[in-house]
Image (cartoon, grey):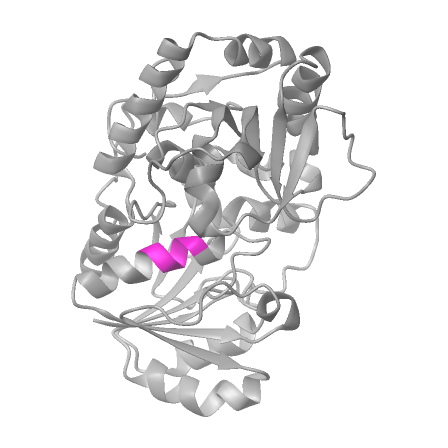
Amino acid sequence: MKIVIFGLTVSSSWGNGHATLWRGLSRALADRGHKVVFFERDVPYYASARDLTELPGCELIFYSEWNDALPSALRHAESADAAIVTSYCPDAIAASQVVLDSKAGLRVFYDLDTCVTLARLAAGERVDYVPSNGYADFDLVLSYTGGVSLELLRTVLLARNVAPLYGSVDPAVHRRMPPRDCFRAALSYMGTWSADRDEALRTRFIEPARHLPEHRFLVGGSKYTSDFPWLPNIYFVNHVPPNLHGAFYCSSKLTLNVTRGPMAAMGYCPSGRLFEAAACGVPILSDWWPGLDTFYLPGSEILIANSSAEAIEAIESSPSELDHIGRAARDRTLSCHTAAIRAGELETIFEFGVSPRAGMAEANTCGA
């Protein structure tokens, strides 16, 4: 197939989770014989932190303004087997019109931020990437999250055909790596700062650091400011590029996963970081949300903390217990959550219009 994507970014992993997902998925699709064309607006804040300029099997088209991209966008969409517009694409409305007017085999919207989209609409906010008619005119809507959000996409955004396509990991990039002293920590956390993760981060990271001053805690990410509640034992690394994610995770005893508020409320919302850390064989401490147990089994493949006390208890777990959990999570990830597996699922969705996971709800299945 020829798959054309109008997205946020694939060239820069700074401050977003879209890039690493598309990198892994594009490689996996190329390995399966498909051609991927990705349109990305060349904006300064991504250009200044660009950590990828070419992707095997993927044609990456940068443009400064939409009118510059329009002739090429029209040509590629017209010959596409599937043309996809994603959430947070800076030209989503214009790109949607091109896709919907084209002869593409499938006209698709992929909401990589479904819970945030729905939460903003519920609050009466305007969502720049949602067309005036919602998702009603697309042949298919893919959702990064499952559960109740799938039905809301139908009722609120008028999507006619919806299927979940969850995050994934490229095990060639995220894998076991030797630890580095600069990333050493009892508990690490990698993620862009956001207001709707702040309370959960304070409960599971800041307070444990306050109660365990003899331990080193490490934050990696962007958009952290001086008014963040820094402590003497909390260290910071600004933006960890994907090629160092493995070393970052593998240098800590335990790593933290914190889910954005709207995603946690909706459930069935595994982040890319969750799969990345698990693929590295690092034990994960996470907040709880509905459906988490369909991806990893609490207590044996992942640890859950609903309070600071539970987070501290997890940090003080024995090395052997944590090692067992990390290994089990890695095994589950490699058998259920790789980019290659998601590429196969996408093929099935494109062919039959439904997810191969439809109806799966048991905790020992791959996905939800």
Residue drawn at point x = 56 percent, y = 24 percent: 187
- Picture quarter with the C terminus: top left
Q: Position of residue 51 (x, y in %)?
A: 49, 63
- Figure quadrant of residue 136: bottom left
Horizontal side of 361 relative to 199 (left or right) equals: left
Q: The magenta stretch spans which residues? A: 20-24
Q: Is residue 272 visible?
A: no
- Figure quadrant of residue 72: bottom left
Q: Position of residue 82 (x, y in %)?
A: 29, 70
Query: Within the magenta stretch, is there residue 21?
Result: yes
User: Looking at the image, is 357 positioned above or below residue 88?
Assistant: above
Horizontal side of 21 relative to 230 (left or right) equals: left
User: Looking at the image, is 242 positioned above or below residue 250?
Assistant: below
Residue drawn at point x = 41 percent, y = 23 percent: 283
How many marks the image carries: the answer is: 0
Query: Within the magenta stretch, is there residue 29?
Result: no
Residue 355 versus residue 296: which sits nearer the camera? 296
Residue 368 versus residue 295: which sits nearer the camera? 295
Q: Position of residue 325 (x, y in %)?
A: 35, 18
Q: Is residue 367 visible?
A: yes
Name the residue at the right extreme. Answer: 227
Residue drawn at point x = 21 percent, y = 35 percent: 335
Q: Position of residue 107 (x, y in %)?
A: 35, 70
Residue drawn at point x = 35 percent, y = 25 percent: 296
User: Looking at the image, is 181 positioned above or below residue 77?
Assistant: above
- Secondary structure, magenta segment, majority class: helix
- Picture quarter with the N terminus: bottom left
Horizontal side of 200 relative to 8 (left or right) equals: right
Residue 210 versus residue 304: which sits nearer the camera? 210
Horizontal side of 33 relative to 167 (left or right) equals: left
- Figure quadrant of residue 338: top left
User: Looking at the image, is 32 positioned above or below residue 168?
Assistant: below
